[in-house]
Amino acid sequence: MSDIQIKKSSTVYDAIVVGSGAGGGMAGYVLAHAGLKVLMLEAGPYFDPAKNSSQLKWPYESPRRGASTGTRNFGDFDGAFGGWDLDGEPYTTKDKTEFYWFRSRMMGGRTNHWGRISLRMGPNDFKGHHIDGLTDDWPISYDDVKPFYDKVDRMIGIYGTVENLPNEPDGIYLPPPKPRLNELYIKKGAAKAGVKVIAGRGSVLTEALPNNKDRGACFFCGQCGRSCKVYGDFSSSSCLVIPAIKTGNLKLIPNAMVREVLTDNNGLATGVSYINKDDMQEYQVNAKIVILGASAGESARLLLNSKSANHPGGLANSSGVVGKYLHDSTGSSAGGWLPQLMDRKRYNEDGVGSIHIYGPWMGDNKKLDFPRGYHIEFGGGMGMPEYGFGWGIEGMNGSVPGRDGKTKEAGGFGASLKDDYRRFYGVGFGMAGRGMAIAREDNYCEIDPNVVDKFGIPVLRFHYKWSDYEIKQAKHMQETFQSIMHEMGAIYDPMEGPETNYGLEAPGRIIHEVGTVRMGDDPKKSALNKWCQAHDCKNLFVVDASPFVQQGDKNATWTILALSMRTAEYILDQRKKLNV
Amino acid sequence: MNRRDSLKAIGFGTISATMLLDACKPHTEKLAEDTSNKAGVDEDASRLPNEIERDKKLAAEKFFDEHEMATITVLCDIIIPKDARSGSASDAKVPDFIEFIVNDMPHHKTPLRGGLRWLDLQCLNRYNKTFVDASNAQQIEMVTEIAYPKKAKPEMQQGVSFFNLMRNLTATGFFSSKMGIEDVGYVGNAPNKWTGVPADVLKQYGMEDVV
């Protein structure tokens, strides 16, 4: 193509925000409401859950009955545009690394389909070095972040219960959804197994959010993963970006894939360059401040690709830490079924699309062979029949008496089999551990020297290995699951063993990857200061999960929101003082 | 009572009722801020243009020939026949679903095509007829040999694997259809207020104290 040119804009925005997920969305929201002129760049299309959600569709409205596809990895109705593999946008691995990178290309990013599980990190998650010396402390403590968690709770809405647990800080809660029947069995079984189970904590409006006229309350369809047409749960699109656009101060450019951060002779950021996927032209836009919220992977990639005379190793990377300390939550799961619940009464128990109950970590590491811990997410019940329904009945219907009291031969066909599907409906349950992985310098992403994506942007290459700590943690998860299922009176398979690392998912699979542009007080060991401001470039900020020094077992989103809000307020304060 | 009022009456507020009803109207216009919303102008705003295109292409593909489709239809109805509560698998168009799904998930193609041929060869050797041409009693006799994994003869193992897959696809296709969902009694996917397990159910399972 001979008509490619770089189109330079003369407009200078107060701030450019790259990415529209939880981090970018919150920064854009705060700054636009404060009157700053903000340009937000998003690599995917505009997405408004009110218009674009598949909520309340029936399985038979999908020709594959809701099964997943290459473009809908979590099912045909899932609210993510993107997935593990994007056409023309590869990533690579080295040293036999198995790493998976989930990317949503859409306004609101991965918050459109996430589980809405909204946990605060605790005091020991921010400052854990004293426990066993294995982790680096954040430069900030829980007390520094608490006011922002509180504000996020009030602004966005979250359900839960006040429990006063040591490292599981309470928030400001709407009432939680009551447990489903299967979850009562889990609660009872867990109690016998010595596992504490409490009400879930999720960003779903189980009641109308006080002082908010733009969002409806939850109507209990259990489909948060599709994104919500009445904005009854948290998506960055519905709760942050659309309100920010409505202020008139934030302009969103969708389908804008940012190539690099531009800097001047003094090493300060002047704007970004991007390719517009609609016209395939190159653009440069300017701002006084650049804020990255592109995700832990993409923000690191952007910085490493933004090389200049002042920043030869990539922007904000004089320390060399950008890309390092990448860590995802550990994950291992199990499931079974409850013969007691066969032939159960039918009623609507869709509930909410986040967790109704969960098990916070209460373990004592002095008695264990691994550091730190994990929480357990539970679920089960009479869900919507979709692709996969009834699968494997030949492994179930031979293990319990039939209606006539006699044990049937497993498998079968005909009227008697048809009846079995009815009898077994709603007996299933599942549980999944999500644990803390130790952030390590030698788990990292870097620029692959040989590979570019279809836009010519060098891609990420991952190097990541689990250690014994994570594997032993997964083993403990499996043992705990077995004891809970035993106490429930459930039927279940034997636990995952050493041949699968006890069911430990490959890194990336839990989609909690964090830590690639970490914060710290020492510019030699960190890229950002405690305000998520680059040590090397004072008008550059990072507001996604990249700044995390060490993730707890808590899912990352609520902390991303709190930190982004904190950074945005810091930016407003620094502008008043004319520092940025 | 109109739908908006009935939504309000079951306990969720004016905002939700209004937004939900508005959201469920067909959309033809785009948001003013939306400069490139390809998703918004297509017939189904929840899907990307490449997904819509792919589904149309898949729906037009035919993998199975007439004989194979006839065999699949007989097998589906043996697995899920009509009974007092609902129709058969073919009444719920399960064979069409299986045709679509193998084009969507090509890993099912060879096990099904090969399994169908395996079945025909068994029947030709036994009855001198293909499966569809065999008598109903012969079809049931044949299926009985491969429908019970634990007691099937070792030489029937390939047939067992094939029949497991047919059983699973038939059940999934049937119970995710409108007819099957009504049969199994799933009553969700509708606005409501979740207030916990009903009292009579708590009592039935002795769970009154667990809540």
Image (cartoon, rainbow, N blue to C red):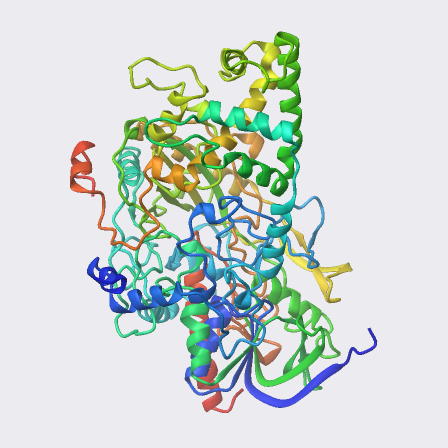
Residue found 60% across the figure and 89% down from its top? A12
Residue found 46% across the figure and 23% down from its top? A394
Q: Position of residue A303 (x, y in %)?
A: 65, 70
Residue found 35% across the figure and 14% down from its top? A407
Nearest to the observer: residue A216 or residue A337: A216
Residue A115 visible at all: no
Q: Is A45 on the left-hand or right-hand side of A61?
A: right
Nearest to the observer: residue A230 or residue B166: B166
Residue A208 sits in which quadrant?
bottom left
Q: Give the quadrant of the C terminus of chain A.
A: bottom right
Residue found 35% across the figure and 33% down from its top? A425
Q: Is A38 on the left-hand or right-hand side of A536?
A: left
Residue A276 sits in which quadrant?
bottom right
Q: Position of residue A472 (x, y in %)?
A: 50, 38
Residue B208 visible at all: yes
In the rendered view, would you say A83 is above or below A40? above
Q: Give the quadrant of the N terminus of chain A.
A: bottom right
Q: Residue furthest right?
A: A2
Q: Position of residue B79 (x, y in %)?
A: 47, 24
In the rendered view, would you say B186 is above or below A48? above
Q: Position of residue B14 (x, y in %)?
A: 25, 68
